[in-house]
Image (cartoon, helix red, strand yellow):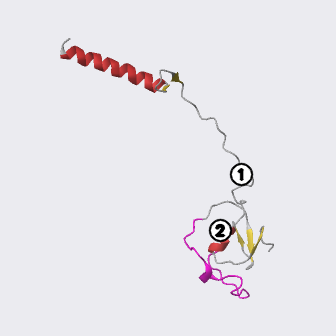
């Protein structure tokens, strides 16, 4: 065979091999398996991750005259750059402010809170 015929034969083999590899998964032992498709279902969260439409986020570092260091202390914030989720699981801080979740209350320096929105 001429070198030109070898190139044609090699190109044909590569074309056929590439087609076989793309259309199914070759296990290497001569058996060919079809590709698996992922049919898993993403579970829904137990609570609604979004705040209600009328919710207003707290203003940062709001001064309250009757709150002592045993309630809010910014010097005790361990990680001011903590990334908090946007999960709506409200807590009522001892300062009377509703926070979207415990992480945001911690980040604001709140030391004590109860589950649920504040009753203003």
Left of 10 or right of it: where is 57? right
Find the distance from the CA under tag 1 to the CA under tag 2.
18 Å
The answer to whether 89 is drawn above or below residue 97 in the figure is above
Would you name the residue on which mark 1 appears?
45
Q: Which mark is residue 82?
A: none
Disc 1 + disc 2, Cβ < 8 Å:
no
Q: Which mark is residue 103?
A: 2
The x and y percentages for residue 62 are 65, 80
Q: Nearer the viewer, residue 38 or 116?
A: 38
Q: Confirm whether residue 97 shows in the render.
A: yes
Q: Nearer the viewer, residue 39 or 97?
A: 39
Characterize the local packing of mark 1: few (<14), some (14-19) or many (20 or more) Cα atoms within 10 angstroms.
few
The x and y percentages for residue 24 are 49, 25
Is tag 1's residue or tag 2's residue first in the polypeptide sequence?
1
Name which residue lies at 69% across and 68% down: 102
Q: Confirm whether residue 58 shows in the render.
A: no
């Amino acid at each position: 065979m001429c070198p030109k015929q070898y190139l044609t034969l090699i190109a044909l083999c590569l074309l056929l091999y590439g087609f076989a590899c793309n259309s199914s998964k070759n296990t290497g032992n001569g058996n060919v398996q079809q590709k698996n498709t992922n049919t898993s279902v993403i579970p829904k969260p137990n609570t609604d991750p979004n705040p209600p439409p009328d919710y207003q986020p707290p203003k940062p570092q709001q001064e309250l005259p009757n709150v002592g260091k045993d309630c809010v202390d910014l010097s005790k914030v361990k990680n001011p750059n903590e990334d908090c989720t946007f999960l709506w699981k409200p807590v009522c801080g001892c300062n009377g402010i509703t926070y979207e979740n415990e992480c945001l209350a911690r980040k604001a320096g709140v030391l004590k809170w109860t589950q649920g929105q504040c009753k203003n």
